[in-house]
Amino acid sequence: MNNLNKEFIDNLCIIDGKAYKLEDVEKMGIDEFSKSAHIFPYKSLFKYYPNVRKYVKEEKKYRNYSFEALTNNTVFLQDAKNFDDCFDCAIDLDYNKFLYNRVHKYCEYFDIEITDNQDVNLAIYLLSNKFYEYGTPEITISNAKTIDDKLRNLYIEVFINKVFAELIDKKDWNLAIFSAINSEYTDFCETLSKFKIACFTTSPYLNRMWSSAYADDNKGFCIEYEINLESKENIDIYNYILPVIYSQKRNDLIQLSLNVDATPTKDDLWQIYYNGLLRKSIHWVDQNEWRLILPDGFINRNPMPFFKIKKVYLGNKMSKKERLKIIKYCKAHSIEYVGMVRKLNSFDLVECSSDCYTCKIDSN
């Protein structure tokens, strides 16, 4: 690939099957992005389940969370670190740049004059001299600038107290400041863990989804959820479901680190979504994924109630025993069901024309 083509691809992304310039998407902000995504609502969203039993050590028993999702009509929101792609939602954040930004910010709070390209080690030395001069956390806090932002003032206090606490162990002002900023870096990188995510797609016929762990190599099932927007509760849920941004280019949140100690703005939230929670490698674009994303504090129940189940698609390697168990539940609750089969002379998956209930095929 020549440099021109690579640059062209690096500047593009795919969202819900359509190509956009990354810079245009970033300029949208969270409100415009959400509005654009929901102009023509999908009538259904789909979620694949492995239908496997897992031993829960704390409860000392086996549970089938997939079957529970079906019978309870709920979805589970998980941490991004548990996703199949280890780089999914990952933040690219250069530690040295983060250190540079934070040290310069703290020098600013103590009226330490440094240049934009000041060596970070010298800046830390100048900052440590201030801490040494003031001698105690209380006096140091009283000499820091008062900022018109309660959260930022609190953040400064926490940093100062952290430096003095680290000094007890490190016995060195410079190392204590390094350690305090290391803690900030770790906390900032863990920002995404404060959000929970449930993943969906727009089709029940995706080979890669069926053949992967999502559906336990075709032994699981796929649930179709009917998107009914007649109630405020359903509208609220749907507005939190956004399409994934597939791109070749990795994300960078270094600019956001400049204001890591400030009260978060809507623009800050958008950067977390745009560069983290919604970002995924272009190699997964065929999944056409949508994500329900909620902050921890917004989740009253997890698994949480979700849209009504319209239909269940049964994997073509599902055992007869499991198939009949799911069909029995579907029949009792007026839920449609259908088996998946490979289309003749094709790799495509299609719905079987026969009734799975009477089918004698047993994949075991």
Image (tube, helix red, strand yellow):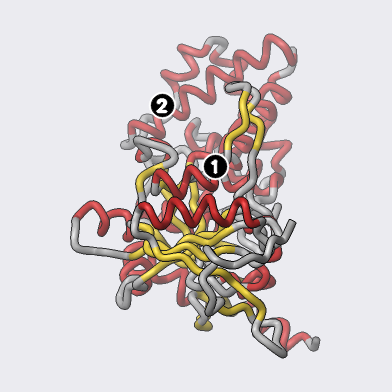
Instruction: Give, as a three-letter code, the residue at label 2.
Output: Leu
In space, the residues marked 2 and 1 are separated at their CA atoms by 42 Å
- Where does the image place residue 142, in percent across and percent down from the top left? 41, 18
Q: Earlier in the sequence, mark 2 or mark 1?
A: 1
Instruction: Give, as a three-letter code, the residue at label 1.
Output: Tyr
The structure residue drawn at horizontal position 51% and vertical position 73%, both measured from the top left corner, is: 203
Q: Which residue is label 1 attached to?
A: 65
| Residue 106 falls left or right of residue 316 | left
- Where does the image place residue 29, in percent across and percent down from the top left? 38, 65
Q: Secondary structure at mark 1?
A: helix
Q: Residue furthest right?
A: 1
The structure residue drawn at horizontal position 58% and vertical position 35%, both measured from the top left corner, is: 63
Mark 2 packing: few (<14 Cα in 10 Å), some, or many (20+)?
A: some
The structure residue drawn at horizontal position 32% and vertical position 60%, both measured from the top left corner, is: 239
Residue 248 appearing in the image:
no
- Where does the image place residue 351, in percent across and percent down from the top left? 54, 77
Residues under numbered marks 2 and 1 in contact, where contact means CB atoms less than 8 Å apart: no
| Relative depth, front residue between 211 and 152 | 211
- 203 over 221 or under it: above or below: below
Q: Which residue is label 2 attached to?
A: 154
Residue 193 - label? none
Residue 359 appearing in the image:
yes
- 66 over 190 or under it: above or below: below
| Relative depth, front residue between 86 and 103 | 86
The quadrant in which residue 364 appears is bottom right
- Where does the image place residue 279, in percent across and percent down from the top left? 57, 62
Q: Nearer the viewer, mark 2 or mark 1?
A: 1
